[in-house]
Amino acid sequence: MAEETDDFVFDYAYPAAAGDIPELAALLDRRLERARALLAEQAASGRREARENGFPYNKYSHGMEWQVVAELPEWLSLSGEQTSYTGGAHGNYGVQSLLWNKAARQAMRGIDLFTSPQALGAALGQRYCDALAALRIERGAPEVIEGDSVFAACPSVDELTVLVGSSNGRAFNRLTLYAGPYVAGSYAEGAYAVDLDIDEAVLAALRPEYRESFAARR
């Protein structure tokens, strides 16, 4: 869906793989309607405020594009890339996780497959922190020193979006850990997405009922 009015610009899309599942399509359509209604309300309020204070009004916007990360016999893993502008110097953006359990007909997030964010963080150990540090070096970002920065040198998993993927279409065997703006660095640095293979430690952090859907990547 794409819509532009005098007050706002709204875009929302999801792939055919999601549209082919009636319950999932209905869920995404409900989210679409809620997002559009909220944007319309915010934009109308923003325009009134601009008029009352005598300054120009810039259209508000909201965009969401869902894409397939992986599809397994029992699962569809999606990532939602969201952008928004509701006034100010710049907009914002981020990523959401949505997993559809085909058998249970249930929507979940990637992190929901694990016993807790803390358990996944412990299982990842230093791997995530080292990979994030390497990305920072590649971008020439300033070194983050604990206690001297508003950003953590290594954000905790509960601050991240966890996406689960697959290299073979049979089992989940990789993770993407997404840190949006202001989580791992300044807005100017952008988001940090770290890809990691699933190993035995990560398998041990899963909820028992989901372990058969995962495999260590060798």
Image (cartoon, helix red, strand yellow):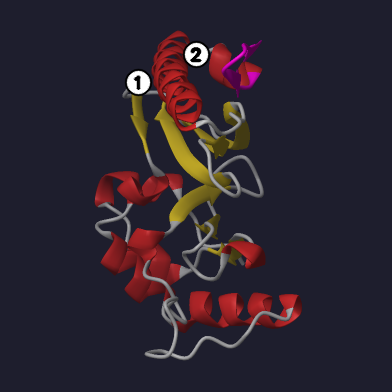
Q: Which amino acid does label 2 sit on?
A: Ile
Q: Residue 72's image quarter?
A: top right
Answer whether labels 1 and 2 touch (C-beta < 8 Å).
no
Judged from the image, the secondary structure of the residue bearing numbered disc 2 is: loop
Question: From what the image shows, is residue 53 above or below residue 115?
Answer: above
At 56% from the left and 11% from the top, the residue drawn is: 20
Q: Residue 197 carries which label?
A: none
Q: Magenta stretch?
A: 1-15
Q: Nearer the viewer, residue 159 or 107?
A: 159
At 30% from the left and 61% from the top, the residue drawn is: 117
Residue 13 appears in the figure: no
Task: Please state if 128 lies on the left or on the right of 125 as rendered.
Answer: right
Q: Which of marks 1 and 2 is nearer the N terminus?
A: 2
Disc 2 marks which residue? 21
Question: From what the image shows, is residue 73 above or below residue 8?
Answer: below
Magenta stretch encompasses residue 7: yes
Q: Nearer the viewer, residue 211 or 70?
A: 70
Residue 51 appears in the figure: yes
Disc 1 marks which residue? 105
Question: From what the image shows, is residue 30 above or below residue 151?
Answer: above
Task: Please state if 196 lies on the left or on the right of 100 as rendered.
Answer: right
Q: Which quadrant does the N terminus fall into? A: top right
Assess disc 2: are there few (<14), some (14-19) or many (≥20) residues with their C-alpha within 10 Å of its C-alpha. Answer: some
Task: Please state if 57 lies on the left or on the right of 52 as rendered.
Answer: right
Q: Which quadrant does the C terminus fall into? A: bottom right
At 62% from the left and 40% from the top, the residue drawn is: 169
Q: What secondary structure is the magenta-colored segment mainly?
A: strand
> Label 1, label 2: how many angstroms apart (C-alpha)?
9 Å
Judged from the image, the secondary structure of the residue bearing numbered disc 1 is: loop
